[in-house]
Each structure stands twice: as structure tokens, then as C-alpha cells.
Amino acid sequence: MTEPAPIDPTATASWSTLAGIADGFTPDLRAWFAEDPDRASRYTFQAADLTVDLSKNLLTEEILAPLLQLAEEVGVADRYRRMLAGDHINVTEDRAVLHTALRRPKGGADLEPAAGYTVDGQDIDADVHAVLDKVYAFADKVRSGEWTGVTGKRMATVVNIGIGGSDLGPVMIYEALKPSLQAGLEVRFVSNIDPSDIYEKTAGLDPETTLFIVASKTFGTLETLTNARLARQWLWENLVRSGGIADTDDARTGAVAKHFVAVSTALEKVAAFGIDPENAFGFWDWVGGRYSVDSAIGTSIAIAIGPDGFRELLAGFHALDEHMRTTPLASNVPVLMGMLNVWYTDFLDAQTHAVLPYAQYLNRFPAYLQQLTMESNGKSVRWDGSPVTTDTGEVFWGEPGTNGQHAFYQLIHQGTRLIPADFIAVANPARPLKDETGDGASVAPGSDVHSLFLANFFAQTKALAFGKTADEVRAEGTKESVVPARVFSGNRPTTSILAPALTPSVVGQLVALYEHIVFVEGTVWGIDSFDQWGVELGKQLAQQITPAVDGDADALAAQDSSTQALIAKYLELRD
Ligand code: F6P
């Protein structure tokens, strides 16, 4: 079905209402909380295991009503349903967008669309579960030691080679779930074509116990294929040197069969690389790279946390999908968070959005979100080719708290920019530790360190919301000349997300939450959040420039003067 033309959000009645409110807007969270004792509960919502407190946002009923009306006017819920059904909402690539199908439980009775649906002639559920079963069987073999290398040893290290969505999702989830990993089985991740990356990641590894997963949707990505060849070279050289294999082509082919598997939508290219199709796990063009961690791209995760853990991860994703599908807009968390982002970006001139996990194991979550959000919504034309009518795609960034507190929070608290921030924490740490001695002052002996940690989570959002007035500063005896520097304006918006623990399910819920936030914003802006043409030009130019860097004079002469001079300098500096 042809995708309907995008609705211009700026032409809607709700947009005019919001623009009117934004004109001269003076938020006052102190007053809003004082006037409304129910504010916290009114704006706290539940999405599966995630408790989401939106009350410290620059939000009132007067603002919420037109935001929800805007979501209706642009048809967020309807477009989400069309996405689930397999409509080609990825217009510029003429593709369905079905990452939600990757986590549908087998044969669920109340699924929408109903089990057994087909898209473009493909039985989606059957194909998804066939691949998952294959991934699980493989993961079990590696975990149990049934899968052995060419010299008969079980695998001790898995090296995932991929980039972008074929790396960031797996590495983020691996880090997030570190406490649930199988002992004696490590996963490393190589992404950068900078040779230092593969050098460092293979350093100290035993080739006889190392398994490489080449993860690439297209199996045409320069970085990944170069690293895959370097890995193969490393394997061959080291196995031959140690006497693990003979120095023959047959022995090399045999080593690849036991030490390389692949994940891709392009299985013929996998075979051309020399990887047995039996050892390849497929997925489909309706899964975008940055939406693919729950496909076979997550094979490294399935090995690391086991099939049961992976099933739990997928169930977490699905729980959020169902929340998004079935919850009315007014309490639908991805819709509310997405619409708040629109409010900040398009009406209050926010340029960036911080994501601040108070969970060390989520240390790669901001990096993961950067691809998800910015590759998806960094667009300036709409899906019908017309220019966007408003700002799109805020810059997402962040670091785990409390490290960020001692680095960039100063600017969030007292700078001139509005930076909405999401604070994420879990109640139960994977590593509960007590400070047995305390510090003899504010930290009592036996203090629970996680509680100390989360006191910061609570304190920061409170400080950002309510600030500190000049009178409060003066009351502390501060000399008058320093008072302005110590005033905190407050009214700096935050969302607090609290989960019981960092389980596979909760990680899946968090990822799906942000996937749907991206969807909501993209729908308002009328953009195709599922293509990524913006990364193509640089890739093409790199190919054109490679001969110049290799010393081809004609190729060098064809470059602009700045590029020529830089390449010349590079060649001069090379030993
Ligand atoms: O950066 C562009 C991109 O196409 C991403 O969308 C994708 O995740 C990444 O490259 C890797 O692509 P592939 O999985 O095809 O190697």
C-alpha cells in the first residue's frame, strides 16, 4: 500500500496552540509542584517494568493536551499499526519496517497482526522463529563445548566483527548484561577499520579457541569485510605457526569452517567469503541495521547470555511493543516522551538531549542511542521528498552518572542552553556492596553503596528542576558578589526512568522504548526514520580517495585543494 503523504505538523491546530504557549513561556516547576500535590503521580507512568516520572518536565495540562492532539493529528497510532502490519513505511527504500516482528512470541494468541501473517509473500513469524531456533541451537553448542575449533578445543572467546547496528547493539547489551555471562566465555567486539582495533581485540587470544562472527546486514561494509579478512589472516597465520593446521589451502578452508560464522541478509556474499552457508544466520531487508540487535545480529549475545536469556530479552522488547500498541496516547510512555522531545526541539529550541544512565553496566547505552536516534531522525526531507517544515533530530549524547556529574553537568545546571535529560536507574544492583567502614562523617559504616549512588540520581533531577534561588544562596551566608554565580535557575527538564534491575527483559524494554520514541518523533516530522542515505556520500568519497592516498597522482590531482594538501601532508608524515 502506498504510504500516505506526510501531514505538515506546523499546519495543524495543535501546533498553533503550542506555538502560542511557547511564546513568552516561563516555566515554574516550583510553583507547579506547590499548586498540584498530585503532580508527581499524575505524570508518572508505567510501561512494563519501567516506572517513568515525567513530572520534572516543562509540562502542564495546558501543554499536554495539544501535544497529544498533535500526535493524533499526524496519526501516530495509525502509522504504528501500519508499521506492524508490514506497510512499506520505509518509503525511500520501498521496504516494510518489521523489527517488532523479531520479538513476537511463538504462536501468541492475542498478537496483532494475528500469527501467520504474511508480508510481501513472506510468512514473517515462521521465518523469524526458524532463524531464532538456529541461533539458539548454535549458541547452545558453543556454550556447551559441543562446537569445537579445528584442533578439537571448545571456544573460549567470540569476536563479533561488525559496525554501526551490527556492533553497537550487541556490545551495548553485552556490557549491560555482564553479570549474566557464562564464565569462561568472553565476547569481544571489533568495529573500527583502524587496524589498532582488531590488533588489540585479538591480542592474547588463542586462535584454537577463538570464534569470529562476521555480522553485516549487507555483507558489503568496507570496515567489516576488511576486519573479517584481517581476522582470517590472523587465524591462518597463528594456526599454521603453532602447528594447529597444515600450511595448505584445504587446511585453511577447514579452519574457516570451524572458526567463522556470519550473520547477514546477503547469504550469497557470505558464501563467497568462504563461510559455509550452514554456519550463516540470516535476516531480512525489513530490519534496519540500528533496529537489528534482536535479530540474528544478536548471535554473540545469545551465546553470551544463553538462549533463555535471549528469549527474556526479546520478551522485554515485546512488552514495550505491546505497551506502545495498546496504551491510550495519554498514558503511552513512548508517545509522551516522543511528544515532549518535539515540544523541546521545535518550541523551546533545545538542540540536544542527554541520556544519563545511573548504571555502570549501561555505559554503552548512550552510544547505542546515538545511532538509533540520529541515524533515524537526522533528516531534512520528508518521506515524500519535500523539505521538512520544522527542526528535526536532536543530538543525543551522554555518559553514565556519576561520572558525568564531574564533567559536563555544570553546563546542564547553569549553562545558557536547554538540555532535556533522561536519567535511568535500577533499584537492585547486580553487584551489591557495602561500605563497611564508612567515612566517619556522612557515610555511615555498613552503608549500601548502591543507595549512595542513587542518592545522586534523585539529587540531580531535584536540583535541575527546582534550582536554588538568590535568597537561598544568601541565607547560607554567601557574600553578595558571589551570589549570582551560585544561583541555580531550576526549570531544567528531566525524565526519571526506574526499573527493578538490569535484567535481559529490562534491557529489551529500554531499547524498545527509545525505538518507539524515535518513531513518534519521526512521524510528527514526516520523515522516514528507517533509511540512512546520509552515510553514503562519505563512503563513496572514501573509495574515490583511496587511490590518492595510495599515491596515485591523477586521483590526488582530482581532489579539492584542501583534501590534496591534507593527503600530501599525510604522505609526507608517513615513515
Ligand atoms: O552507517 C550506515 C550503516 O548502513 C548502518 O545503518 C548499519 O548499521 C551499518 O552501516 C553497518 O552495516 P552492515 O550491517 O550492512 O555492515
Image (spheres, rainbow, N blue to C red):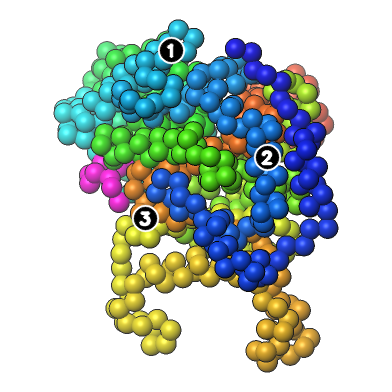
Specify the quadrant that holds the C terminus.
top right
- The span from disc 1 to disc 2 (Cα, nearest Å) is 33 Å
**Of helix, strand and loop, which one carries label 3?**
strand
Q: Does the residue labelled 1 lie within 8 Å of ligand 1?
A: no
Which residue lies under the disc numbered 1? Answer: 118
Query: How much space separates mark 2 and mark 3, taking CA atoms?
Result: 33 Å
Which residue is pictured at 34% across the width and 16% down the height?
126
| Residue count near mark 3 (Cα–Cα under 10 Å), binned few <14, some 14–19, many ≥20 | some
In the rendered image, which residue does mark 2 sit on? 69
- Are the two marked residues, 1 and 3, in contact with CB atoms closer than 8 angstroms? no
Seen at 40% across and 57% down, the residue is 426
Query: Residue 152: image x %, image y %?
Result: 16, 28
Q: Is residue 70 visible?
A: yes
Secondary structure of residue under mark 1: strand
N-term-proximal mark, 1 vs 2: 2
Q: What residue type is labelled 3?
A: Pro
Residue identifier under label 3: 500
Q: Nearer the viewer, mark 2 or mark 3?
A: 2
Give above or below for 328 relative to 81. Answer: below
Q: Quadrant where the N terminus lies?
A: top right
Percent x, y for residue 560?
Answer: 81, 28
Is residue 472 placed above or below 103 in the rendered structure?
A: below
Q: What range is drawn magenta here?
A: 179-192
* Residue 194 seen by the camera: no
